[in-house]
Image: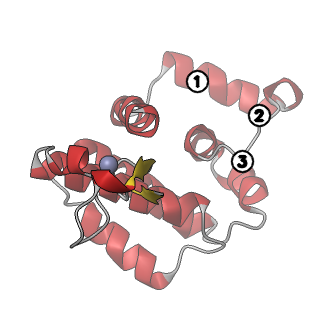
Amino acid sequence: MARYCICCTRMRPNEAFSGRGPPVCHRCKKLPKLERQASMALEEIHGFLCRQKNISAKNITRLRELLDFPSHDVAAFARMVLQVAEIAPRRRHRVRNLQARDPVLLRQVAEVDYSIEIDYSDAESLVDVEFESLYEPSDMTEPIDRFYDRYDRVRTG
Ligand SMILES: [Zn+2]
């Protein structure tokens, strides 16, 4: 039997858990508290963006709280998802709406939402965006890159 650890987001053997409290494996319990909370917050935000049909008003309240989270990765990801919620809270037509209103944001979303595929070869506007982001990195680029590194690390262990 295996259980899902809500911190490293992987299936871990039953022995890796103690009976009480939230399902967090022993290995994750040894992480510093802030790092553990950051992993869980990233996963929570990822859920709002990628696993829900709609980013709800309640989610938005939670995202605003996470703007003050003492980790830039979490705060930056919360800020990004709040921007998405402003333009396209519903998953349906999100790609189309973001492409029309904020193609740079769409690119950032596509990096974390693997269900989105963008055909860059076929979209002149996105080619421009790509060019811009290569030569004029926005403030968001650095924390978001760090988030991806971290996120991949957490996902793949
Ligand atoms: Zn774990």
Residue, x 47% and y 83% (percent of image)? 57
**Furthest residue to the left?**
32
First-in-chain label (2 vs 1): 2
**Does residue 49 lie above or below 31 as drawn?**
below
Residue type at mark 2: give it: Ser
Neighbours of disc 1 within 10 Å: few (<14), some (14-19), many (20+): few
Q: Which residue position holds label 1?
A: 132
Number of the label disc, if any, that sits on residue 115: 3
**Does residue 85 lie above or below 153 as drawn?**
below
Residue type at mark 3: give it: Ser
29 left or right of 42 in image: left
Number of the label disc, if any, that sits on residue 125: 2
Residue, x 60% and y 63% (percent of image)? 51
21 left or right of 134 in image: left
Residue 152 position in % (x across, y down):
45, 33
114 left or right of 93 in image: left
Residue type at mark 1: give it: Glu
Neighbours of disc 3 within 10 Å: few (<14), some (14-19), many (20+): few
- Check if mark 2's residue and mark 1's residue have beta carbons within 8 Å: no
Residue 109 visible in image: yes
Residue 83 visible in image: no
Using the rendered view, name the quadrant where residue 5 is placed: bottom left
Residue 76 position in % (x across, y down):
34, 48
Q: Quadrant of the C terminus?
A: top left
Residue, x 27% and y 70% (percent of image)? 22
**Does residue 117 lie above or below 120 as drawn?**
below
Q: 14 or 96, which is in the foreground?
A: 14
Neighbours of disc 2 within 10 Å: few (<14), some (14-19), many (20+): few
Q: How far apart, in angstroms, are the residues tagged by discs 1 and 3?
A: 24 Å
